Amino acid sequence: QVQLVESGGGVVQPGGSLRLSCAASGNIVSINTMAWYRQAPGKQRESVASITRGGSTNYADSVKGRFTISRDNAKNMVYLQMNSLKFEDTAVYYCNAGVTSLGRGLRNYWGRGTQVTVSS
């Protein structure tokens, strides 16, 4: 069974920084695109950033220039460095990945999320 576990959330003041991490574990053969999504209260889940296995990245316009996604393929990890945080970045952040595992083939997996709160 493949699991994605996020960490690194917390409370930060506007203008501050946080680094989220997501660890994938299980009978993993390979991981394709990894991504971060977020869902604010009363809003739909939205894509924040994604990164292919080869390192190509894509960002939502709202976070370009402030957030950086990266991954460590050897460790099956993906990270999200968040700088210059704003009130509107407050949300639960979810890790997502396309994972090929033994006996299950390629499936899309989600973590349980980590809360990021930007507050003064």
Image (spheres, rainbow, N blue to C red):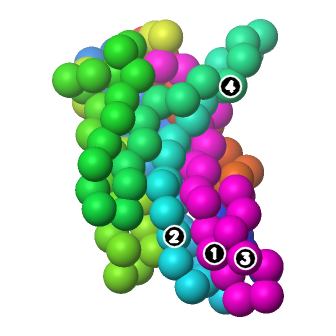
Which numbered disc covers residue 100? 1
First in sequence: mark 2 vs mark 4:
2
Label 1 residue SS: strand
Q: Nearer the viewer, residue 41 or 29?
A: 29
Mark earlier in primary sequence (1, 3): 1
Query: Residue 113: horizontal and vertical position, in percent?
Result: 67, 45
Q: Percent x, y for residue 50?
A: 43, 43
Residue identified by numbered label 2: 31
Amino acid at circle 1 = Thr
**Local crowd size for mark 1, using a 10 Å CA cut-off: few (<14), some (14–19), many (≥20):** some
The answer to whether residue 74 is left or right of residue 87 is: left
- Residue name at image x 57 percent, y 35 percent: 37
- Residue type at mark 3: give it: Gly
- Which residue is tagged 3? 105
Mark number, residue 45:
4
The picture places residue 98, in percent across and down from the top left corner, at: 60, 60
Q: Residue at x 51, y 70 (%)?
A: 31
Cα distance in 3D space between marks 4 and 3: 26 Å
